[in-house]
Each structure stands twice: as structure tokens, then as C-alpha cells.
Amino acid sequence: MPEICIAVHNGMLSAALAVRDLNHYYSPVDTKAIRERKYQAWETTYPAWYLFGSVAKNTAGLVELYSRQGFAVSLCPQSELELQLNAGLALLDVQFCTLDDSLCRKFTAANTKISGYLPAILAGKNKQTSEFYRQGLSLFLPTQKSYTYKSEPLLPDSQSEVWIVKDAIGSDCRGTDGLPYTVWKKDALADALPGFLAALPAGRELVISEFIHTSDPYAGLADHVVHKMHFFSSCDGSGFAVRPYGSNCQKIICGCNHSLLQDKSFLPLKKYIGQRHYTTGHVEQTEYFNRFLAGLEFMAGSRLIFSVDFIIPPDGIPRYLESNKLAATFAESFDSSRPPLIDAYPFLPL
């Protein structure tokens, strides 16, 4: 029976298995037994839903769905991937980890198919936005700029009075060191910027962007609504192409605390946007959206699933924030007529 190995970021795999110390490899027999325990369990984490399924989330998970296709399924932590080079794998699934480019070439040379691969450089916000610039699609970006300690301490040219400062790599409103993203009044940020840059360590990058406000008629005219939409890349015969997974998305609805920002001059992002409310929305396939979709083609190098965060201000033109292939929403159903994206993924063309 051909074997598929699912490689998982160490932290995600620890959370999925609810263990502190990982084995270097979980055989198909081990993996099947773990799945039988985890599928029925309640209060599991989202990595467990992706791998082992969940009754509560109504998702089957990768282990079960690959098994139904006739494969023996094993698991491996990202840190131990190189040990699998000579395992004779039919497929290596790296959707939930980062595969080093050179190691990817070695697995390919060993006749192992790869799924879920994205070059590590594309995890950074700066590189993602530079791909839009490269394609002449700056229309779909906020006015923004990346900075290092060597950068000139001047804000980008924009009339925006509210700005956000964030790390080039981060999630859930925080950077890699755990410090929160912050929102600033323009004048206060201009004054603070020279000190920010002088304190930046070598190799560290900040992204400073105008803060995009909305006036969403489908969300009580809320002034900050983030759309989180699922996309996939799969082979269409002539190569890999990106497609939206339906027309629905998750909407994260917030009301910004303008008066507090005026008083304080800067705030942690979560303090500024306040309590988040979640609902499901529909994204119209307008001319703007189709052009925006074309800008995501840089994600099309492998069979892959990912989420995209974007904002639609009153001018109707989507503003791209970031893509994430380790998203926490793949077991959610934004459209009740479709299975969760994680359950569609194993059947996408390679």
C-alpha cells in the first residue's frame, strides 16, 4: 500500500496530539489509532480537526480521507522531515509546515510527489505585497512601506490620519516576539518613527501601513470589517492556478475607538478595533474582485489551500492584507452547501 506522510509544524503537531514530547515519526498503525481516539473527542484543537477530523466540526480530516483513497498515512514533525527522504513515500503533504526549498528538491528527486508546498519566503507580508507591486496591482494594497534600522524615518505618502505598525511576520494582531501590533495617529507616529528604527535589530523588519476603514452596509456601517476568504491552488492541466473556494467568506466586524486614539495617540490594535464579531458574508465576483484574484497567482506553485485577509473600503476596491496557508479556519464552513475546505483539499488535482 503506497504511503502518504503528513508533515506538520512541531507546535501544531504537539497541539493536535496534546503531547509535549513528539516522536520523530508516527507510523500508519500509530496514526490510525490516534485518529480513532481523536475523532470522537471533544475540546480538541483546530490542528487536530485538520488531521483527525471532528464529530463536533463535521469534518473527516486528512488521515481519514487519504486512507479512503487507498493510502497508508503517517505523520512526521517538521523538524524530522529529512529522515523521511529514503522512505519511498508516494506523497509528502507539507500543507501544515514549512518545507525548505533544498529539501523539496531532494524529495522531488526521490520521486515523491509534494502537496501543500509554498516557498518559505512567501510567508512574509513584505514578499506577499511585493508580488502585487510586481504585477502592477498596487491598486489592491494599502499605502504601506517596510522598514529596517537603515531606512529613512519618513512615513509613506498618504493623507491617512491613522496608521498601523506591525511585524513582517506575525498573526492574531501580534508579531513574532509576542508584542502587539499598534495603531497610531499620523503626527505621533511621524515623531516616534526615528526612535523605532534606531531600536530595530539587524534583520528585523516592520511594516507601516495606512489603516483602512470601511462603512459596510451589510454590517451596520461598521468601520472596520475584515474578510477572510478561502482559496486553493490546484493543477488545471496546463499548470497550477488559484481559485476561490466558493463565493462566501468569514467577516470579522469591528467598531474602531476613534475617540480613545485621539486621546492616547497610539493604541494596541486590539484596543483600537474593540470586540470582534463574526458572521458569514458573500463576495460578489466583480471586475475588481477578478483582478484582485489574478494578483494571488503567486501562491500557485503546488496543490495548496490558504486563506486571504482583505478589506473592502467604500470605493469597493479590495485591499489585500495577507495570505496564510496555516490558517485556523479550514474546518469552518462559510457555505453550508460545501464541505469544509480541509475535506475538499485531498481531492484537488495534483
Image (cartoon, grey):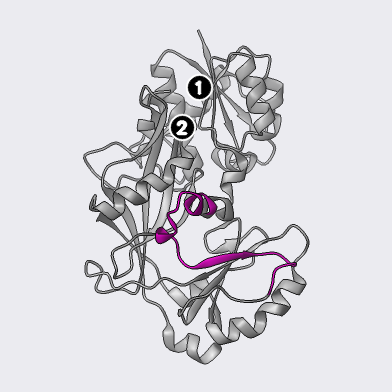
The amino acid type found where label 1 is placed reads Lys
Q: Which mark is residue 52?
A: 2
Rate crowding at label 2 as few (under 14), some (14 to 19) or many (20 or more) other CA atoms within 10 Å. many
Residue 70 is situated, as x and y percent measured from the top left of the image, at 42, 12
Would residue 15 be counted in the magenta stretch? no
Is residue 131 positioned above or below 17 on the image? below
Residue in the image at 46% along x and 36% along y: 300
The answer to whether residue 54 is seen in the rendering is no
Residue 277 is situated, as x and y percent measured from the top left of the image, at 35, 66
Going by the picture, which residue comes out furthest to the top? 1
Residue 326 is situated, as x and y percent measured from the top left of the image, at 51, 44
**Magenta-drawn segment:** 130-152
Element carrying mark 2:
helix
Looking at the rendering, which quadrant does residue 349 occupy? Answer: top left
- Relative to 161, 251 lies left or right: left
CA gap, disc 1 and disc 2: 9 Å
Q: Which residue is mark 1?
A: 32
Would residue 133 be counted in the magenta stretch? yes
Nearer the observer, 258 or 320:
320
Residue in the image at 68% along x and 27% along y: 103
Element carrying mark 1:
helix
Nearer the observer, 106 or 4:
106
CB atoms at circles 1 and 2 under 8 Å apart?
Answer: no
Q: Quadrant of the C terminus?
A: top left
